């Protein structure tokens, strides 16, 4: 349908000989067919590797350039996503959908278009900040529009809000969907986008990314209001079925529609599968000590308040923790769905770190690229968390607000409620520390509850592709420079990792010891420890994995050099990126 024409913003022109508004957009079927292409903005099979998200919690065989601090300045538009093809399709549709005489169909699919335009611009905002706003299709002859300057992020977020509102009103009569967007998906996006921009402005006030110190308070108010509307009127509820509802929420072919607002599904019929099972068990994907430390104990107390938490061994540290830990990370006693045999962590793959099990289904899906667990994009739990965080950052959060949001998440796993007064009376020093925490958090009477809301967010939304943007908006990029630690081992010896009292792993130096039913790992070859012969398992400890986060650059991507050049300087460059151009 589209031919790619060179332009300073890579916006394509629709070929008139193949598609004409005079002969198309005349029926509901044609509106549906055209807008279906907008779902290309939905994270795709290849890109939907949640365990490949840039995070201080997730470890793989390599580190993303964003974390390493080595991402290059892009030269071409496609290098980092500075592509506008789908936006032109959306605007072309909105310009011509009036040709359909069926008003009801037109409203429904116009709503889909407005949603995806907002979704497109939200993704551009988080990556590039200021970007040109286009609400009409631009052709190759529209030189002035093609090379227009970037609009401010203030303009962009207001357009996102407006498009979400239009999408909500237009799609509301057509009910809830789960694998398609609907009115409530538009509210979910509005909630996410306004929280992002509101907190980004707050934590970047006075920096090169918000040099005018624009306030985010109004956006945080909109986030709270929008979230509450969705909570009260959307008709969604938390999934509660079975003995492990949190685990079951993600290990399913069909999304749990009572909680999931929008999801991506996989399978033969829809052209894709993924690799969750295989990546979990054999592909060197693992979770860090930093992440495991966040889980509270079952009595609601903080694990890191225990004086010996740093030297506690695996079976002990997993005992008596928030049930979501054992439903996200492999803990002693773990059995894969459909099996009765207890499995130990595969230390050969994880190199001493924690094996994730979220999204892992039965062994029918273990083969390479054969997993089909559905992937939530928006779910009610995030809306609860957005609501609580927006109010906490505003300083207007109450205990009642916590009870209708975060404490419902805790009820699902039978965890004690978050008490606002107690949290503020004793802010978690671990979570504020330079070494392990998020030291840029607001220092106020509300610091304690802000930290606890963040804790809940990181635990509840782990591996759901939201954490990297959280790090951006909290201005905590320096966390990527910290060590990536795993389990603690006091030294060479045999260890029980299943909790049955029998050793199943042996860590050694020198000559390999004997033993039956053991996995052997040689120190400084198969596993590396932070103190040489003891300490935390370490990944990325060599010079090849040194990380350097640039505070005055890395919160945004650079604008591609060729786009800047074609614009004659109309497109300015982002802070810290030197492309050698003299404009």
Image (cartoon, rainbow, N blue to C red):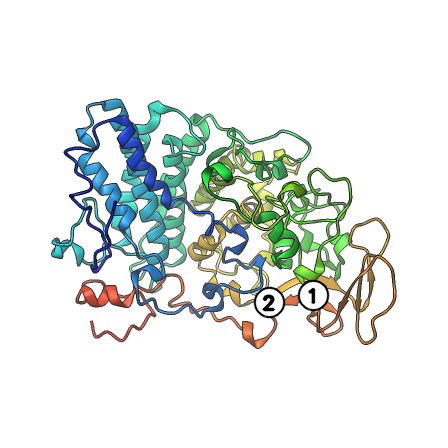
Instruction: Work out whether 409 lies above or below 438.
Output: above
Determine whether, in the image, residue 370 is placed left or right of residue 94: right
Q: Does the image show residue 241?
A: yes
Determine whether, in the image, residue 434 is placed left or right of residue 158: right
Measured as percent of width and height from the top left, residue 468 is found at 47, 55
Determine whether, in the image, residue 545 is placed left or right of residue 282: left
Q: Residue at x 54, y 32 (%)?
A: 256
Q: Is 176 in front, or is 129?
A: 176
Residue under circle 2?
483
Q: Measure the alpha-carbon separation of dots 2 and 1.
A: 10 Å
How crowded is the residue under tag 2: few (<14 C-alpha within 10 Å), some, or many (20+)? many
How crowded is the residue under tag 1: few (<14 C-alpha within 10 Å), some, or many (20+)? many
Residue under circle 1?
536
Q: Is 343 in front, or is 203?
A: 343
Measured as percent of width and height from the top left, residue 40 is found at 37, 44
| Secondary structure state at the residue bearing disc 2 | loop
Instruction: Work out whether 161 lies above or below 458.
Output: above
Image quadrant where one finds the N terminus: top left
| Secondary structure state at the residue bearing disc 1 | strand
Which quarter of the figure has residue 412? Answer: top right
Whichever of labels 2 and 1 marks the residue nearer the N terminus, that label is: 2
Instruction: Work out whether 58 lies above or below 227.
Output: below
Measured as percent of width and height from the top left, residue 9 is found at 23, 57
Q: Does the image show residue 572?
A: no
Q: Residue at x 36, y 31 (%)?
A: 183
């Amino acid at each position: 349908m589209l031919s790619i024409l060179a332009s300073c913003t890579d916006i394509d022109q629709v070929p008139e000989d193949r598609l004409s508004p005079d002969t198309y957009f005349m029926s509901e079927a044609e509106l549906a067919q055209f807008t279906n292409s907008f779902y290309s903005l939905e994270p795709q099979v290849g890109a939907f590797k949640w365990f490949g998200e840039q995070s201080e919690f997730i470890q793989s065989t390599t580190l993303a350039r964003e974390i390493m601090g080595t991402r290059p300045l892009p030269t071409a538009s496609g290098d980092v996503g500075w592509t506008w093809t789908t936006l032109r399709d959306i605007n072309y549709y909105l310009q011509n959908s009036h040709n359909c005489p069926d008003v009801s169909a037109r409203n429904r699919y116009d709503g889909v278009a407005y949603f995806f335009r907002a979704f497109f611009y939200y993704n551009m905002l988080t990556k590039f900040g200021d970007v040109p706003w286009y609400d009409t299709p631009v052709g190759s002859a529209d030189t002035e529009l093609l090379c227009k300057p970037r609009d401010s992020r203030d303009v962009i977020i207001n357009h996102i809000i407006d498009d979400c509102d239009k999408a909500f009103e237009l799609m509301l009569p057509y009910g809830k969907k789960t694998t398609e967007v609907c009115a409530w998906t538009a509210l979910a996006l509005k909630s996410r986008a306004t929280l992002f921009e509101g907190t980004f402005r707050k934590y970047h006030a006075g920096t090169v990314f918000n040099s005018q110190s624009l306030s985010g308070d109004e956006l945080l108010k909109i986030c709270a209001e929008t979230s509450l509307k969705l909570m009260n009127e959307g008709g969604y509820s938390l999934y509660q079925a079975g003995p492990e509802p949190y685990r079951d929420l993600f290990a399913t072919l069909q999304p749990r529609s009572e909680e999931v607002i929008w999801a991506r599904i996989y399978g033969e019929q829809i052209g894709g599968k993924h690799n969750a099972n295989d990546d979990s068990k054999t592909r060197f994907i693992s979770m860090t000590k930093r992440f495991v430390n966040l889980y509270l104990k079952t009595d609601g107390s903080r694990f890191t308040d225990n004086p010996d938490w740093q030297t506690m061994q695996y079976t002990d540290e997993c005992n008596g923790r928030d049930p979501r830990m054992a439903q996200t990370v492999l803990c002693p006693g773990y059995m894969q769905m459909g099996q009765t045999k207890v499995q130990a962590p595969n230390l050969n793959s994880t190199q001493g770190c924690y094996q994730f099990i979220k999204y892992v289904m039965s062994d029918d899906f273990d083969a390479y690229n054969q997993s089909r667990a559905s992937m939530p994009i928006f779910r009610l739990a995030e809306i609860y968390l957005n609501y609580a965080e927006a109010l906490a950052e505003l300083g207007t959060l109450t205990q009642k607000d916590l009870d209708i949001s975060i404490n419902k998440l805790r009820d699902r796993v039978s965890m004690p409620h978050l008490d606002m007064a107690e949290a503020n009376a004793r802010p978690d020093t671990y979570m504020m520390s330079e070494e392990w925490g998020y030291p840029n958090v607001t220092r106020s009477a509300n610091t304690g509850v802000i930290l606890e809301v963040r804790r809940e967010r990181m635990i509840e939304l782990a591996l759901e592709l939201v954490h990297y943007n959280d790090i951006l908006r909290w201005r905590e990029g320096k966390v990527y420079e910290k060590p990536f630690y795993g389990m603690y081992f006091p030294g060479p010896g045999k260890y029980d990792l299943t909790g049955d009292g029998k050793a199943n792993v042996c860590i050694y130096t020198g000559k390999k010891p004997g033993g039956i039913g053991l996995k052997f790992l040689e120190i400084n070859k198969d596993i590396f420890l932070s103190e040489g012969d003891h300490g935390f398992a370490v990944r990325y400890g060599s010079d090849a994995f040194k990380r350097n986060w640039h505070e005055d650059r890395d919160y945004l991507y650079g604008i591609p050099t060729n786009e800047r050049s074609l614009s004659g300087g109309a497109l300015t460059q982002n802070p810290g990126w030197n492309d050698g151009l003299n404009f």
